[in-house]
Amino acid sequence: MNENNAALTGNWNYPTRVRFGAGRIAELPEACKESGIARPLLVTDPQLAAFPMVQDALAANERAGLPTSVFSALKPNPVGGDVDGGVRAYRAGGHDGIIAFGGGSALDVGKAIAFMIAQSRPIWDFEDSGDYWTRANPEGIAPVVAVPTTSGTGSEVGRAAAIVNEATRTKKIIFHPRMMPAVVIADPALTTGLPPHITAATGMDALAHCLEAYCARGCHPLADGIAVEGLRLIREWLPTAVRDGGNLTARAHMMAAAAMGATAFQKGLGAIHALSHPVGALYDTHHGLTNAVFTPYVLVFNRPAIEERMTRLAAYLGLAKPGFAAVLDWIVELRRQIGIPHTARELGVEAQRVGELAEMAAQDPTAAGNPVPLSVQALAQLYRNALDGRV
C-alpha cells in the first residue's frame, strides 16, 4: 500500500464506530463479538449472496465460533414483505444480531429487521413523521454490524430505512435512533468489483445527499461542513472510480463521501428525493440513478434560495468563475461524463402519470426540507422538465 493509501484507514466514532480501510473485512468476527452478537443473521441481496466476499465472511465467522445464516430474499427496492421474511428467518434461526452486508437495499432491510424484532405494531407505524418513532419499543432491538459494498446511500451510518409499502406503492422512511448500526466495517476493497454504471449511479446518490443536505432548510453548520467536503471528494474521485474500478484510493474516498452524505442529511433532504422516491416505488428504478437524473432540474428550481450557497460551494470546489452556473455546469458535465441519462423519460417515466407522481412527491417527508416550498403544481412541473430535458 503506498503512502497515500496508507492514510486511508482508521477507527472513527462519527456518528457510530467505523473501522475504515482496505482489508478490514477480516475484522468482522471481532466486530460481531464487540457488539454482543454470537449467532448473526447476515442480510444481503440475492446476487451478492453467492459472491466470494460473502462466502469468505461466513467462513471467517464459522472459524471464530460465530455460526452465521444468510437471508437474501429482498428486492432492489425493498418492500415490507422482505422485512417480514427476514424477521421470520431471524426468529426461526435463534439469532441475536444482524450483519447488514451489501448496498443500500441490504443495509436498509438488515436494519429494519433488527428494529422490527422488538415491535408488535406494523412497520408503517414508524414512518419518519413527527414523533412516530416514540411509538416503538426500544427494548430488544437487535444490534447491527453494517458492511457496505457500494459507495452511495451511506445507510451504514444512518438511523432509517427506505422500504416500499406494497399496498400503497409508496416508499416510506422508517426511523428510530436505535436503528444506527453498532459498528461499521467500511472496506473499500469490497467495492472494487462494482461495474462502472453502478459506481456512477451510487456515486451520484452520495452527491445528491451531500448537495441536498447543504441546501436544506435550517441552520446546521456541522452538516454543511461535512456536505461540502463530501462534494469535494466526489468531484475529485468519482470519475476515477468509474473509469478505473480497481483504483483503491478512489474507492476509499468515495466510500468516505457516501458516509459523509448520510451523516450530513440528518439536516434534511429536499425535492431530489421527493421526486425520486415515487419513481422508485412505481417504476422500480435504481435510487441513485433516479436521484442523478433529477438533480439539475431541482438545482435550477431552487436557485433563488441557494445562489449564495452555490457561490461558496463553487469556490470551495475550485470551480472556475465561482457561482451558481459553475456548480450546475459541473454536475451536468459529470453526469454526461459518467453515463447518467439526461431525462426521466429514459428511466421509463410516463407523462400521463405526472399528476399521480406529483401528489406522491408532495407527501414524501423529504419534501419539507427543500429550500424553496414545494406544491403539487411545482413538483408536476419539475417532472415535466425532467421528462423533456429542460434544465
Image: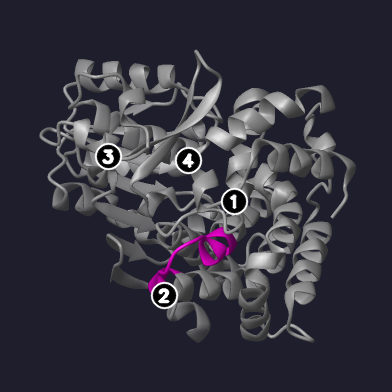
* Residue 221: mark: 2
Q: Is 62 situated above or below 340?
A: above
Q: Is 26 situated above or below 276?
A: below
- Residues at badges 1 and 4 in contact (C-beta under 8 Å)? no
Out of 43 and 120, give the one closest to the viewer.
Answer: 120
The residue tagged with tag 4: helix, strand or loop? helix
Three-letter code for the amino acid on which mark 3 is drawn: Asp
Q: In the visual, does 357 lie left or right of 257?
A: right
Is tag 3's residue or tag 1's residue first in the polypeptide sequence? 3
The residue shown at (72%, 48%) is 294
Total residue callouts: 4
* Residue 131: mark: 3
Three-letter code for the amino acid on which mark 2 is drawn: Pro
- Residues at badges 2 and 4 in contact (C-beta under 8 Å)? no
Which label lies toward us, 2 or 3?
3
Q: In the visual, does 192 lie left or right of 40?
A: right
Q: Where is residue 226 in the image (x, y as percent from the top left)?
A: 45, 72
Q: Name the quadrant of the C terminus.
A: bottom right
* Residue 267: mark: none
* Disc 4: CA contacts within 10 A as few (<14), some (14-19) or many (>=20): some
C-alpha distance separating marks 3 and 1: 22 Å
* Disc 3: CA contacts within 10 A as few (<14), some (14-19) or many (>=20): few
